[in-house]
Amino acid sequence: MAAPPLGSILLGTTNPQRLRDWYAAALGPEGGGFTEVSPTMFAGNFGDVGLLIDGRDDVADKNPEPGRVILNFHVQNARATAARLDDLGVTWLVEPEEREGGVFGTLVDPDGNFIQIIELREG
Amino acid sequence: MISDPRTPWMPTGIGRSPRLRKVVLGSRAPRQLADWYRHALGLSDVDAETKAGDASLTAGGVELHITYQSHVAPEAAEPIRAVLNFVVDDIDEVEARLVATEAVWVRELERVPWGIIGTVLDPDGNYVQIVEPAREPLPWSREE
């Protein structure tokens, strides 16, 4: 059996419009934004993977376990992305910093999910 | 400044859209969790060094990195918070493999407008969905 690709990740949220708007403004999916799958479900593409935002009433407003699943986004320009995120007033767990291999930063989305942005150094 | 003419809607300097390249799963039992993804889904290890006890598996263009995390409970508090959707070619084959590993089914295989879908729990209680897409494009696919 061929190893199956991860096609998408679904984030359950009590406020799908807010989460959609945040990911659209903070990271910007391909093609200009999210597609409305239903009035409470939105989908955007980030490279090979879709991000599905699903409005639900069986999760809390804030993620009680943000360390369980952390999404890592590779960006072309971490500093420019960080400036954009600062404009949105995001909370950084780890401000973007130079490490071996590139620039890494960890922040929190409006639901309390942890996400990481990474600009890999070439070569 | 880097700009990408293919994404004119992005502010100058950001470049192309970010790519979701890695998902980190924090676990109290990372070895057991990684073994499950290897055996139940057939994921293979990325050829790279990882911290002892961690695992880096490949799932298409995405790395699934499994690491020890002391701040999570043994079982996911809210498994619907983040669900991994794996795209499979032959869902019956994957189902048989999951049954053989005695996976716990949350949603047995079901035909939906965009294909066939089923949901199981990984050993940490995370929801893992398997999807065999219909021949038609997914409803959220970009129009070419």
Image (cartoon, coloured by chain):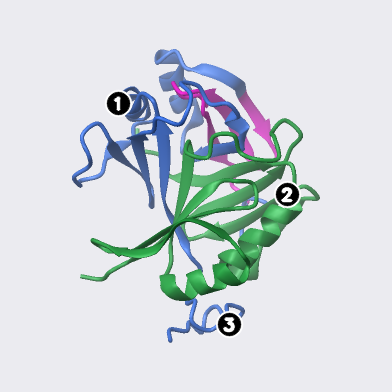
Chain colours: A green, B blue
Question: Which secondary structure, mark 1?
Answer: helix
- Disc 1 is attached to a residue of which chain? B
The span picked out in magenta is: B109-136
Q: Nearer the viewer, mark 3 or mark 1?
A: 1
Give the crowd class for mark 2: few <14, some 14-19, many >=20 residues within 10 Å: many
Frontmost residue, B59 versus A26? A26
Residue at the spot of label 3: B8
Circle 2 residue: A16
Question: Quick check: B90 above or below B11?
Answer: above
Q: Point out the tag, 3 or 1, that comes first from the N-terminus.
A: 3
Residue A115 magenta:
no
Q: Main secondary structure of the magenta part?
A: strand
Residue type at numbered disc 1: Arg
Q: Is residue B71 above or below residue A14?
A: above
Residues tagged by mark 3 and mark 1 found on one chain of the structure: yes
Q: Residue at x 44, y 26 (%)?
A: B93
Numbered circle sitting on residue B31 = 1
What element does badge 2 sit on?
Answer: helix
Give the chain of mark 3. B
**Quadrant location of the N terminus of chain B in the rendered image:** bottom left
Residues A70 and A34: in front is A70
In this view, the residue in front, A71 or B21, is A71
Instruction: Using the image as rendered, state which of residue A61 and residue A54 is in the foreground.
Output: A61
Identify residue type, mark 2.
Answer: Pro
Res A61 → quadrant: top right
Residue plotted at (46% across, 24% down): B122
Q: Position of residue B100 (x, y in %)?
A: 40, 14
Q: Name the chain letter of the residue that bears numbered label 2.
A: A
C-alpha span from label 3 to label 2: 26 Å
State which quadrant residue B105 falls in. Answer: top right
Q: In x, y percent, where is residue B137?
A: 62, 53
